[in-house]
Image (tube, rainbow, N blue to C red):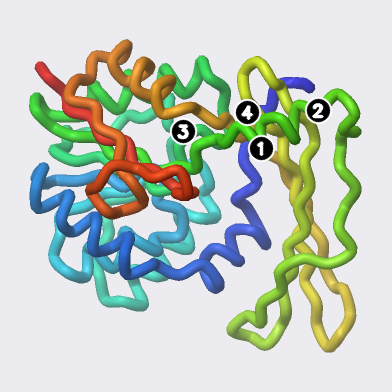
């Protein structure tokens, strides 16, 4: 499987995130508490279309945002304008490992965006950039989906053929203008040693029952075991690493499909 370094969060897929993916109350409640605990200013790393950033700004939090996709960042600007939120100077189009902001933060968080569109080497470099952008004692919070041994065994099965076949249909949503947007995804490959999965997506725009536009994209998703991510954070200079369940603050449970890893910059 060849190296992939991009993401698919452009065009129609960015529009899906802007119109279909909404902030979850549990995520916002967790971030309010985390920023209250660790302090401001905060940085939403991989802010996308602003689904978390804009509500936090509307509540008065001092939060900036970065994302690799200029399309997503423009949607974030549009959402801020609609909400009456001043966002000038708060947004930047940047990769995680190319993070370069003019100020330092007390809290940096990434909700579902870490370890996609890169590689283990770039993820390690991203953690170093995050460390450099925190004030001493500042915290990073990384929310992601950990691997399961069952998933690993299934994806690394020598009998499995890649790429997987495209499904006939996928999730479909009605957009603000009445058009319908459908997403279809498949696995393109899997590196069992690195636990990196290549994924492909097709976005289909339907109007009055007719397919009027189709776009495709790909990304590379790395599934880190919590202990692997802990070692990477410590290697980047972090301490006080903790693994929690999904936005609960408690220890993770085997059934959890999301974990939050937090760490502090010690100096």
- Look at the picture and state if 140 lies above or below 194: below
Q: Are marks 2 and 3 in contact (CB under 8 Å)?
A: no
Residue 193 location (% of width, % of height): 65, 15
Q: Counting residues from the N terminus, which is met first, the one under dot 1 or under dot 4?
A: 4
Q: Secondary structure at mark 3?
A: loop
Q: Residue at x 83, y 88 (%)?
A: 208
Foreground residue among 76 and 163: 163
Instruction: Answer few, some or many: residues within 10 Å of disc 4's Cα (few below 14, many 20 plus, some between 14 and 19).
Output: some
Name the front one of labels 2 and 3. Answer: 2
Q: Counting residues from the N terminus, which is met first, the one under dot 4 or under dot 3?
A: 4
Q: Are marks 1 and 2 in contact (CB under 8 Å)?
A: no
Instruction: Answer few, some or many: residues within 10 Å of disc 2's Cα (few below 14, many 20 plus, some between 14 and 19).
Output: few
> Seen in the image, is 110 located left or right of residue 57?
right
> In whole angstroms, how far apart are the C-alphas of marks 4 and 3?
10 Å
Q: Which residue is mark 1?
A: 151
Name the front one of labels 3 and 1. Answer: 1
Q: Which residue is mark 4?
A: 5
> In whole angstroms, how far apart are the C-alphas of marks 1 and 4?
23 Å
Name the front one of labels 4 and 2. Answer: 2
> In whole angstroms, how far apart are the C-alphas of marks 3 and 1?
28 Å
Q: Quadrant of residue 31?
A: bottom left
**Mark carried by residue 95:** 3
Residue 58 location (% of width, % of height): 21, 70
> In whole angstroms, how far apart are the C-alphas of marks 2 and 3?
32 Å
**What quarter of the picture does the C terminus occupy?**
top left
């Amino acid at each position: 499987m060849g190296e992939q370094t991009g993401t698919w969060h452009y065009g129609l897929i960015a529009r899906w995130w802007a119109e279909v993916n909404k902030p979850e109350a549990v995520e916002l409640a967790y971030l309010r508490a985390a920023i209250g605990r660790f302090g401001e200013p905060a940085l939403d790393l991989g802010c996308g279309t602003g689904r978390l950033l804009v509500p936090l700004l509307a509540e008065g939090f001092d939060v900036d945002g970065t994302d690799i996709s200029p399309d997503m960042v423009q949607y974030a600007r549009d959402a801020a304008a609609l909400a009456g939120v001043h966002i000038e100077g708060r947004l930047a189009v940047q990769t995680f490992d190319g993070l370069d902001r003019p100020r330092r933060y007390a809290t940096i968080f990434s909700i579902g965006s870490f370890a996609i569109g890169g590689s283990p080497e770039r993820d390690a470099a991203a953690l170093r950039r995050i460390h450099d952008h925190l004030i001493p004692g500042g915290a990073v919070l990384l929310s992601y989906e950990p691997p399961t041994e069952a998933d690993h065994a299934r994806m690394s099965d020598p009998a499995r053929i890649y790429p997987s076949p495209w499904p006939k249909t996928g999730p479909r949503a009605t957009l603000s203008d009445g058009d319908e947007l459908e997403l279809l995804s498949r696995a393109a490959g899997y590196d069992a040693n690195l636990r990196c999965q290549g994924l492909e997506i097709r976005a289909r725009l339907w109007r009055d029952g007719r397919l009027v536009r189709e776009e495709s994209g790909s990304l590379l998703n790395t599934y880190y075991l919590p202990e692997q991510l802990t070692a990477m954070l410590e290697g980047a200079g972090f301490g006080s690493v903790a693994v929690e369940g999904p936005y609960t603050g408690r220890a993770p449970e085997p059934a959890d499909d999301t974990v939050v890893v937090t760490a502090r910059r010690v100096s």
